[in-house]
Image (cartoon, rainbow, N blue to C red):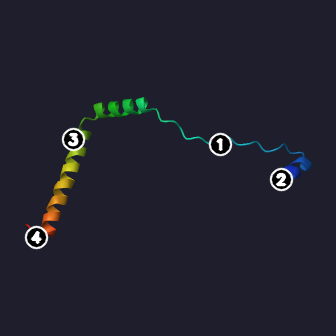
Amino acid sequence: MGEAKRRKELGIPPREKTLETQLPSLDKQAIQKKIRSFLYKNPIIPFLFYGAAIATLAWGLYSLLKVYKFI
């Protein structure tokens, strides 16, 4: 409360109370539209993603077989 008294003595108006920040609400429909429009413009992205996923699984399987000396 010391600051409030000092401000009053100096003739400065009281500090404005800040509003509590709220997390922005997610609009799922808008996000879906953005993602779909991006994927329609860039149709190669899903193929790259699935290709990378299959390559990662194949590399993991190969490494696993190599560790257990099946190869």
Q: Residue furthest right?
A: 9
State yes or no: discs 2 and 1 in contact (Cβ < 8 Å). Answer: no
Q: Amino acid at mark 4?
A: Lys
Is 12 in front, or is 4?
A: 4
Q: Which is nearer the N-term, disc 2 or disc 1?
A: 2
Using the numbered discs, state the Cα–Cα distance from disc 3 to disc 1 in whole angstroms: 44 Å
Using the numbered discs, state the Cα–Cα distance from disc 4 to disc 3 in whole angstroms: 32 Å
Q: Is residue 29 left or right of residue 20?
A: left
Using the numbered discs, state the Cα–Cα distance from disc 2 to disc 3 in whole angstroms: 62 Å
Mark 1: give few (<14), some (14-19) or many (20+) Cα within 10 Å. Answer: few
**Residue drawn at the location 33% of the way across and 31% of the way down:** 36
Foreground mark, 2 or 1?
1
Q: Quadrant of residue 41?
A: top left
Foreground mark, 2 or 4?
4
Q: Which is nearer the N-term, disc 3 or disc 1?
A: 1
**Residue drawn at the location 37% of the way across and 29% of the way down:** 33
Q: Amino acid at mark 1?
A: Glu
Q: Which is nearer the N-term, disc 2 or disc 3?
A: 2
